[in-house]
């Protein structure tokens, strides 16, 4: 049972069981019954609006860059505050995730043909590689690269 469900079971006007006994039976701290979250300040709302505008322009900004841009705009903000507000708004920086160099399962993997081949001085010309960097163009007196 979730915490919200257990809190809903607590009856404040129960004459038989006290609040302490109900909380003990439901395994809920009494302080959670009385907790009221603080409302979001107007300053935080204005900053969140500006952060949303920045995110739409540059979605790859993380909390450090977001805080730096906000400070440059005149806001009094540190990295922790920028990180908390982006978490509250549900924003996340778009960046390259790990394992991006893994091959796609549908792509063909070409075998390495020289594996296990011993190349020594007695066998010249077994493996050849040609690389042409320039060529002569027919009918012209210049080299093309």
Image (cartoon, rainbow, N blue to C red):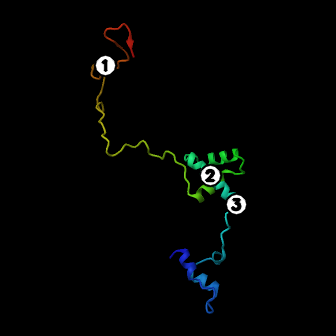
Q: Name which of mark 1 and mark 3 comes first in the sequence.
A: 3
**Which residue corresponds to the image point at 57% horizontal and 83% vertical from the top-left?**
25
Q: Quadrant of residue 83?
A: bottom right
Disc 2 target residue? 51
Disc 3 target residue? 42
Disc 1 target residue? 121
Q: Name which of mark 1 and mark 2 comes first in the sequence.
A: 2
Q: Compare residues 140 and 112 and report the one nearer the observer.
A: 140
Q: Can you tell which of label 1 and label 3 is closer to the viewer?
A: 3
User: Distance of mark 1 from mark 3, alpha carbons?
Assistant: 80 Å
The residue tagged with tag 2: helix, strand or loop?
helix
Q: Name which of mark 2 and mark 3 comes first in the sequence.
A: 3
- Image location (x, y in percent) of residue 49: 63, 54
Mark 3 residue crowding within 10 angstroms, few (<14) / some (14–19) / many (20+): few
User: Distance of mark 1 from mark 2, alpha carbons?
Assistant: 66 Å
**Which residue corresponds to the image point at 42% horizontal and 41% vertical from the top-left?**
101
């Amino acid at each position: 049972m979730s915490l919200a469900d257990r809190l809903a079971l607590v009856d404040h006007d129960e004459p038989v069981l006290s609040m302490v006994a109900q909380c003990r039976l439901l395994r809920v701290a009494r302080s959670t019954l009385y907790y009221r979250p603080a409302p979001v300040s107007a300053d935080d709302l204005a900053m969140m609006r500006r952060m949303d505008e920045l995110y739409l322009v540059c979605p790859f900004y993380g909390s450090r860059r977001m805080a730096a841009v906000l400070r440059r705009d005149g806001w009094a903000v540190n990295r922790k505050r920028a990180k908390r507000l982006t978490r509250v708004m549900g924003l996340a920086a778009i960046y390259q995730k790990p394992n991006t160099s893994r091959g796609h399962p549908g792509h063909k993997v070409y075998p390495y043909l020289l594996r296990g081949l011993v190349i020594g001085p007695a066998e010249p010309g077994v493996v050849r590689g040609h690389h042409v960097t320039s060529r002569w163009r027919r009918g012209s007196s210049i080299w093309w690269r």
